[in-house]
Image (cartoon, grey):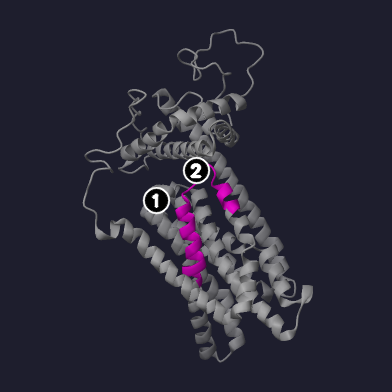
Amino acid sequence: MATSPPHPSYPIGPADGPPLAGPGTAGSLRHAHWWQRAWVRYGAPSTLLAISGLVILALVREETGTEGFLVGLGLAVLPVPLLIAAFRWLDRVEPGPWRNLLFCFAWGACAAALIAIVANSFATRWIATATADPSSADTLGATVIAPVVEESAKAAAVLLVFLFRRRDFTGIVDGVVIAGVTATGFAFTENILYLGTAFGTDQLTGGTGIASVTAATFFVRIIMSPFAHPLFTVLTGIGFGITALSDRRRLRRVAFPLGGLLLAMGMHAMWNGSSAFGEYGFFAVYAAFMVPIFGLLTWLVIWTRQRELKTVRAELPAYGVAGWLTPAEPYALGSMRARRIARQYARRHLGRAAAREVARYEAYATSLAFLRHRARRGRSGPDFAVRERELLGELWRRREVARPALDHAARITAPPVPVMAPPWPVYGVYGYGPQPTPYPAYNPYRS
């Protein structure tokens, strides 16, 4: 049965931060294996992605020509900032590091795209040779081979982050963001290929304007369905996110990601095969499946984010009782509006650097709340105490900048004080001890 984690000890004094390293902790000097060295962990993936990028660049340019490649690149880049901003917005409660997102986008745009092009081409040629029917080979390749190959290639990035950046992968929202950014990179490269090829076709046939193949391709891939690939792969990300939240049973840890991957493949196959449903098959699949599922997943992610905020409000008061946080902070950190007001306050009075420090403080506090929540449910792992100490140290170093901003945000967003006072005395913010602050009382568990 899971038990509550030990109560965090109180900081000794204003100048006394928590010890971040010591014998037996993560900061102790130990001999690292060669594959754990920083230049290997960062250099090997960077080299692999760079080589994949050069190869995919050459293949796409050979397929589309230089002019077609430039046109495709210019058009394909248009939805990328919007999609990245959308996924970053979903990840505001506990934003993951940018290096993870850069890796995922590069993996999707380079490694996954290269795997897909090579594997799809080989499989389609093999089917055409075996059946002597090129048209059926193209159909079978698009509806069966491509979904399996492409979703597996994109899922590899989610798996790598899940295995090697486990601290940054704590729930469903993280899975959605990592999978979505990976698929955005993949769709970016694929759109370059499709739009560049369409432009080359128009040059041969003389098509221009709205009636051109380029305009039709742009409308379908950029205007109507820029979220198609992210939507497929997000199902895989949700599977990994559920695994991050579930217990340590081996069957569940395998079943959820595999189930999400199979759903992603099935939905991808239905999307690619929509043209087989008749003249209006594409629009039927789009209206009956794509849009509703997109809306359902959006609701799921936003609902999950609200659950995360409730976790922050529920877990952080323990650190307020121990003296690591002020009584106002759990309430402010559990409200997106209060967080935004705190950053604005810091920026207005102390500058942009202070606002960034407040944002980091908010992120570390959220990670601390999630860590304690996992520990309370028996899923924290053996390094709970070390990780907790590290996060408390990050908060303690930023307290001089963050606390005034968060206290101000708590006063601004606190519920109004009742007009009629209760007939009995109320002591303290949480019901105990003297009232520590002059701002209006509030309920820290109210959203």
Q: Where is residue 334 shown, x and y percent of the image?
A: 53, 33
Q: Quadrant of the C terminus?
A: top right
> Is 179 in the magenta?
no
| Residue at the farthest bottom position | 132
Residue under label 1: 166
Identify which residue is drawn at 64% across, 68% down.
Answer: 74
The magenta stretch spans which residues? 85-113
**Residue 165 % position (x, y):** 39, 52
Q: Which mark is residue 94?
A: 2
Q: Secondary structure at mark 2?
A: loop
Locate residue 370 relative to residue 338 in the image: left or right: left
Which circle's residue, 2 or 1, is located before the other in the chain? 2
Taking 121 as reference, is 133 above or below it?
below
The residue closer to the viewer here, 202 or 329, is: 202
Please, what is the three-letter code of the amino acid marked with disc 1? Arg
Residue 421, quarter of the rendered image: top right
Q: Quadrant of residue 132?
A: bottom right
231 over 137 or under it: above or below:
above
Kind of residue indicated by mark 2 = Glu
Residue lying at 39% horizontally and 64% vertically, measured from the top left:
45
Spot occupied by residue 184 in the image (x, y as percentages of width and height): 56, 62
Seen at 63% across and 77% down, the residue is 68
Q: Nearer the viewer, mark 2 or mark 1?
A: 2
**Residue ID at (55%, 77%):** 60
Q: Which quadrant, please, contains the N terminus?
A: top left
Q: Vertical placement of 346 versus 433: above or below?
A: below
How far separated are the C-alphas under marks 2 and 1? Answer: 14 Å
